[in-house]
Amino acid sequence: MRSTLLHGGTVLTVDGNDSVFPGGWVSFIDWRITGVGPAKTRPDPAGFDEAINLENHMVLPGLVNAHTHSAMILFRGRAEGQSLLTMDGWYNAIREPELAMLAEDVPPAVALSCAEMLLSGTTSFCEQYFFAEEIAEAAGRSGMRAVIAYGIVQLGDEKRGEEELAKATAFLERQRSADGRIIPWFGPHAPYVDNTEDLLKAEAAIASKFGVGLHLHMAAGPEDNEETLKRYGLTATQALARDGFFRGRVHAAHCLDLSGEDIATFAEAEAASVAHCASAGLRSGREGVCPVVDLRAAGVVVALGTDNVAANNSYDMISEMRIAGLVATHREGKAQILSSSQLLRMATIDGARALGLDSEIGSLEPGKAADIIVVDTAGVGYSECPDPATLLIYSGSGRDVRHVWVAGERLVRDRMLVRRPYADIRTDYSRAYEIFWARVQSRREAA
Ligand SMILES: [Zn+2]
């Protein structure tokens, strides 16, 4: 048993009252938080195996990146001038080189993504991609918590759909990893556009059989609604509801084009949530913007995601909160329609709710897992400010994250990864990057 006390920092608990304790404290034993409170109730540091004085720091729950594709770090900066939320843009920028990707390219890429996420304060992420086995293993090695949705791209190849379904089932059968941090889900890529209706129905049935969630892109590109309206006279959301997608847990990324009826479908479902990817949406040049305010008003859980690195170029969830706040303000024409504490909830507890993990993570409360991050606020930009969440979101950066724990395990100490040095991860990645892009090039030349 090992006990730890973090004290003297500003603690943003993200509990039900958004309690903030300046000079407060958090204690945990092994993996579990045992206490949180204001300065005047601080326990004696001498009673702990380790006590860390965090004056001039903020202490908050680990951030949850609710939508990404971590192997796609290989495409950083490779989609400039292309919209990744249209079929054409995605195909030209990503799909063509992606077809050259081999399983061996994936672990070093995922390791670098996990390193970037951890070092900028993200402790949990929701992944959707193929190579789910390799991703799960690499994410597991990083120590992060991750929901890994097994992605299927069928694109008219029915045999491939069947094979993938069998592999995905085998992936789900294994359930959570032994330490509980890796959680397998199912993830059709872009419904109807690249998965047939039969395959989608089979996917929903398998997810329900194993009691796992479905994570997919929904109403992201114009093709989504166009395709289903043409075929069935229904929006993508309504078509998916008809095919059983809203019966269990469903977590949908983007949702740029939702009708009032679509929002009601999300609200009425037992466990439906949205991953709002503000940067990716802005960058795509699409006219639609996720109706975050309407979704929240209807009671729908809206979490935040960076989407893939090519759609964003960054995993910094602090910056993602800022952009989500600005986008909502612009869309609604009302200054800061999402408050800083609401944005912080979206990046923590609402992300946890979307992944069905809110009883374990997402806030600093006794009994929850010790997924905790510490932000150094001694540096430039962090002068006096009445609201610490505003200070963090609008003046801060993921680069100011100093310490990170997941399930009580210290994964970042003084801005350095504990399990494996960043420099080693980066060296492996650079080698994999060279090999991957050389392979893409030789395929292009052979074509
Ligand atoms: Zn995506």
Image (cartoon, rainbow, N blue to C red):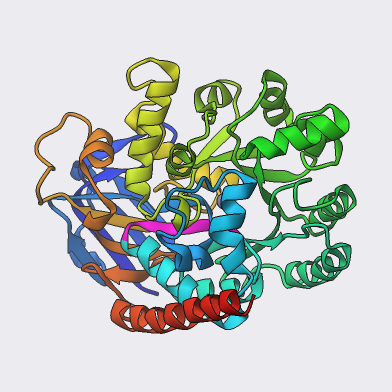
| Residue at 33% over, 46% down | 318
The magenta segment is: 120-128
Q: Locate the N terminus by quadrant.
A: bottom left
Q: Is residue 3 above or below residue 89?
A: below
- For the stretch drawn in magenta, the main secondary structure is strand
User: Total label count?
Assistant: 0
Answer yes or no: is residue 30 visible.
no
Q: Locate the C terminus by quadrant.
A: bottom right
Residue 113: percent from the left, percent from the top?
Answer: 43, 66
Using the image as rendered, state which of residue 136 and residue 324 is in the foreground.
Answer: 324
Answer yes or no: is residue 231 visible.
yes
| Residue at 62% over, 48% down | 88
Q: Is residue 341 above or below residue 49?
A: above
Position of 307 compared to 224: left or right?
A: left
Magenta stretch containing residue 124, yes or no?
Answer: yes
Using the image as rendered, state which of residue 27 and residue 408 is in the foreground.
Answer: 408
| Residue at 45% over, 74% down | 111
Q: Is residue 173 above or below residue 320?
A: below
Using the image as rendered, state which of residue 309 and residue 142 is in the foreground.
Answer: 309
Position of 393 compared to 44: left or right?
A: right
Residue 64: percent from the left, percent from the top?
Answer: 46, 51
Using the image as rendered, state which of residue 261 and residue 159 is in the foreground.
Answer: 159
Residue 161: percent from the left, percent from the top?
Answer: 83, 63
Position of 141 compared to 221: left or right?
A: left
Residue 91: percent from the left, percent from the top?
Answer: 62, 55
| Residue at 10% over, 51% down | 379
